[in-house]
Amino acid sequence: MDVSETIAPVKVRTNMADYDQAYADFKWQDVEKEFSWHETGKVNMAYEAIDRHAETWRKNKVALYYSDENRDEKYTFRDLKRLSNQFGNVLRNIGIEKGERVFLFMPRSPELYVSLLGILKNGSIVGPLFEAFMEQAVRDRLENSDASTLITTKELLPRVPYQELVHLNHIIIVGDAPDQVDETADIAFYSYEEEMKKASPQLDIEWVDREDGMILHYTSGSTGKPKGVLHVHNAMIQHYQTAKWVLDLQEDDIFWCTADPGWVTGTSYGIFGPWLNGASNLIRGGRFSPEDWYKTIETYGVTVWLSAPTAFRRLMAVGDNVAGEYDLSSLRHILSVGEPLNAEVVHWGMKVYQLRIHDHWWMTETGGMIIANYPSMELKPGSMGKPFPGIKAAILDDAGNELPPGQMGKLCIKAGWPSMLRGIWKNEERFKQYFPFEGWFESGDLASIDEDGYFWFEGRDDDVIQTSGERVGPFEVESKLVEHPAVAEAAVIGKPDPVRGEIIKAFVSLRDGYEKSDDLLEELRLFVKQGLAAHAAPREIEIREFLPKTRSGKIMRRVLKAWDLGLPTGDLSTMEE
Ligand code: 6R9
């Protein structure tokens, strides 16, 4: 990577004129003054994101453009205020209280966004689940969170093992009723549409403390079950200011975040950041297709577009002429997050969109953006940019000492930024592990800083896999694989892939009596796909007689990875014979 190459700003019309100035002057406390709760001390994210605008001249401004294959709808801030009030009342009528976990498991739709806002207005904690999750993934999350209520659809209900979830008491079905439900289970079923009809559009919002729980996002680690990362209403300070300065949202923007709200990008920046700024959000349901995406930009006149490296790489793979068939001239700002954005993709973006693709870095645990390339700043292709004002990020060595420019180490952040995670649900021990050095949060990523203060991503410090922008814990996939009768042991690694960032590769040893065959490999793939999620299914499976293990019995993924890539294996002293 060429750390000296820079690309000057393009089409600049920006909220942050000068980065260095902003970094020097900025105080989070000043952002609080943008909100009325600065005085009352009581707050509600949904009020600040929606109602606040519905009470001003913005009331008739379109807050949400929603479209998919079958629907094409618009909702103003006033519409969303009314609908989310109604949904807040639906929950209240059922008896759902502040702090209860209410989960969403459905495809993107206006009802998903209305429900999410209504849950927050009720003071409950929302848990959005990715629609592609299969039974095990759904079960783990609902079980760990002790969710009392689930909002889902007829199509997805079969993947919810509600009979076995002792804390789950209410299921609200959006759309068509299920053909049949297990009436012996201790669950009350409701129709979203019926309940909404009965619910008043007047709601006494539950005003909460800024440190009260707001959202639980489950994310994968390298060991154990997925972790419930807890964020609080206070995170809005960061969502608001980063959307202003990094997304650079302005009054006339049409903003499109392509991420699903099952992932943190789809809530922090698919919902909160833009609406806190009173911007118009576009949500496009359905799957990725280059034609559909470009058509969406053209039809809605998207001005600011946030997506992921894997999407840009796939757009690059279909060839430049596809982009040329659409009018993309409305675009003025493009952003990328989730994985390293290769310099090559930035160069391609300059050629095809005549715009820079702005890489930025953060993670589920940080709740909001931490390091970014800003529209007015010189951009270095391949770099994640510089820390957001008010944030100190550094590269630390294994003892927690700051490393000088040019050296790779642990990417850490000074604890205390507004949207920092406040806990791991029911796992205090795991939460503490994020802070191994006094006052610092450890991200688990490796990075370096160059002489100009730009941050460069170097890799993960653990075994977490990033495939097509989605974070997959090897342990979850391994656990699923070993559930199959043919599998004795499994180890899963991320293998570098030019399009997907990484692909999932599984090493499997078979139980006695099973033979390797193409049918079996296919069956294993399907087993993970149907049991966990399509994106978690291994693209490659290699059968091995033994897997390398430590003496204490831990499978050594790094050794498999090194063998697989033909790299040195490093220290093998703990490996069993
Ligand atoms: C927002 C989100 C977090 C992990 C993170 C890192 C990787 C995110 C990146 C990046 C290189 C970037 N990551 N942005 N790696 N360059 N610009 O993605 O959250 O799903 O929790 O993933 O993603 O490894 O630690 P999450």
Image (cartoon, helix red, strand yellow):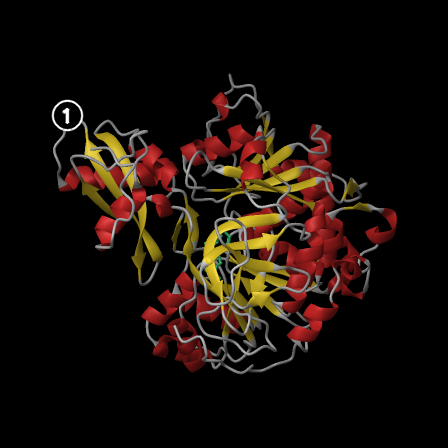
Residue holding disc 1: 512
Q: Position of residue 264 (x, y in %)?
A: 55, 50
Of residue 315 and residue 421, the one placed in the foreground of this image is 421
Q: Is residue 119 above or below residue 239?
A: above
**Residue 109, placed above or below residue 216:** below
- For image coordinates 75% across by 62% down, the residue present is 27
Does 124 sit above or below residue 24? above
On the image, the x and y values in percent for residue 452 come to 54, 74
Label 1: which secondary element: loop
Along the line of sight, the residue nearer the viewer: 1 or 317: 1
Instruction: Locate residue 132, reporting x and y percent.
Output: 43, 44
- Quarter placement of the N terminus: bottom left
Q: Which is nearer the eye, 473 or 391?
A: 391
Q: Residue 453 at x, y = what percent?
A: 55, 70
Is residue 449 found left or right of 60 in the rendered image? Answer: left
Residue in front for this viewpoint, 281 or 467: 467
Is residue 73 visible to the viewer in this orientation of the structure?
Answer: no
Q: Quadrant of the C terminus?
A: top left
At x 37%, y 48%, the residue is 535
What's under tag 1, amino acid-wise?
Asp
Image quarter for residue 101? top right
* Callout 1: CB less than 8 Å from ligand 1: no
Does any portion of residue 232 appear in the rendered image? yes
Q: Residue at x 18, y 27 (%)?
A: 511
Name the side, left or right, on which 571 lies relative to 105: left
